Amino acid sequence: MTSTARTPTILVVDDEPSILDALQKVLAKENMSVRTASSGQQALDILRNVPVQVMITDLRMPGMTGEDLLKAVKALTPEVEVIMMTAYGTVENAVGAMKLGAYDFISKPLKRAAIIAAVQKALDKHALVAENRELKAQLAAATNRPIVGNSQVLRAALDMARQAAGSSATVLLLGESGTGKELFARYIQQHSPRAARPLVPTNCAALPESILESELFGHEKGAFTGAVRAREGRFLEAHTGTLFLDEIGEIPLHIQVKLLRALQEGEIEPVGGRLSKVDVRLICATNRDLSEEVKAGRFREDLFYRINVIPIRVPPLRDRLEDVPLLADHFLRIFAGKHGKPVSGFTEAALYRMGNTAGPATCARWRTRSSARSCCAAAASSTRATSRRSCATRRPAMGVRSHSPWGPRWRRSSAG
């Protein structure tokens, strides 16, 4: 019936009890486990405690709307497939929901066959992406992942990170998206006196403003509609450890005030609760120029000086092209193992092409689009990988050593 190994759990969210009851009966007959919620906050509470594969939610609800809930779900539990439903179905509604990450969009009055078909397809997609999602989660969660590279600019940034690790001062990681700022945060935490304590990463840009305060500082039972139980925030999760706030420039001003108090006084105030002490080492990251944000009035000046104690700039890949061969080999080993392919290295032509096309990319983007992934997926029994565009047939220009285009020893000839 379904592609999941165990009975799938479906979460239905609607402020109309009749809709909840009807959908629960329909889906239960299909041997699905059904949980129901009458509000967005109640749905989020369920998602935090129950593994859910598919969520069906109404678009228009009092309080947190279906779109707000969709944003929150994709930030907190992105693996959940979301189906939107509404009695006010329009092409604009459907397109907007899809852009926000919804899997499907169905109109009321609901038809049994349409509901079952939509849920089955959503479950199929959930199963298809499970393997890839698990790999990404393992790579993202691993605390011992190496920072690959040996370039001078990278070593200088790592030396500064190592020096900062021994103190309790706040670190601000600066750099473009995809340059590896979270890796640097983990590196600092691993070499700090708090290495044995938890590191709690939080992407501030991915959390909707309506729940960001609750996610960071927690809330008490009954603090707002749908808060059926008290919940600890990220600060308390990181107590005695390290909290990593990625994209801190996205935090709205009214929450910046509470963050400033946490830094100055070591105190947090849960939504609807009282002040409590926390012991947290804070590492922040941003791809924005916070000094310009301060001038524009979008970021508090006092908070900026509090987090800008030890600024570290994480270099983009185009500034360390000599690291490309090391990164290529690193990703090759990862994807060769994933696909079970006996690929042991790259041809000189493949390395040459990568070195001449990798400049503008960040590490994250290059990893996603790299020849390592495509070569491993396509290789049959060969032990050396070529470029994805048959670069073995593309000869370097005269005067260029084909071994490698990186570093001072392999500068390209001006005649080329």
Image: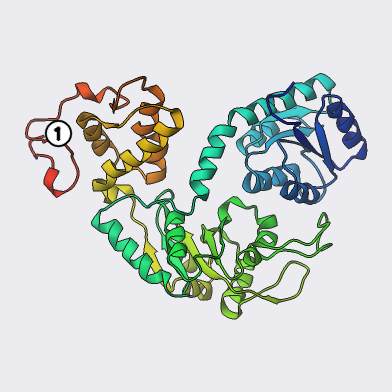
In the image, 198: left or right of 41? left
Q: Position of residue 100 (x, y in %)?
A: 63, 39
Measured along the vertical axis of the image, is residue 200 above or below residue 75?
below
Q: Could you tell me if residue 109 is visible in this image?
A: no
What residue lies at 46% left-to-right and 60% top-to-bottom? 185
**Image quadrant assignment for residue 356:** top left
Left or right: residue 374 versus residue 300 is left
**Residue 321 in the figure: left or right of residue 56:** left
Judge left or right: residue 204 versus residue 380: right
Front residue of 300/396: it is 396
The picture places residue 48, in percent across and down from the top left corner, at 72, 50
The amino acid type, in three-letter code, at marker 1 is: Ser
| Residue 21 image-quadrant placement | top right
Placement of 277 over or under 294, stated as above or below: below
Task: Identify the residue at image location x=69%, y=42%.
Answer: 70
| Quadrant including the N terminus | top right
Image position, residue 384 (x, y; %) = 27, 27
Question: Considering the numbered disc 1 on the image, is that residue within a helix, a strand or a loop?
Answer: loop
Residue at 24%, 38% (x, y): give it. Answer: 355
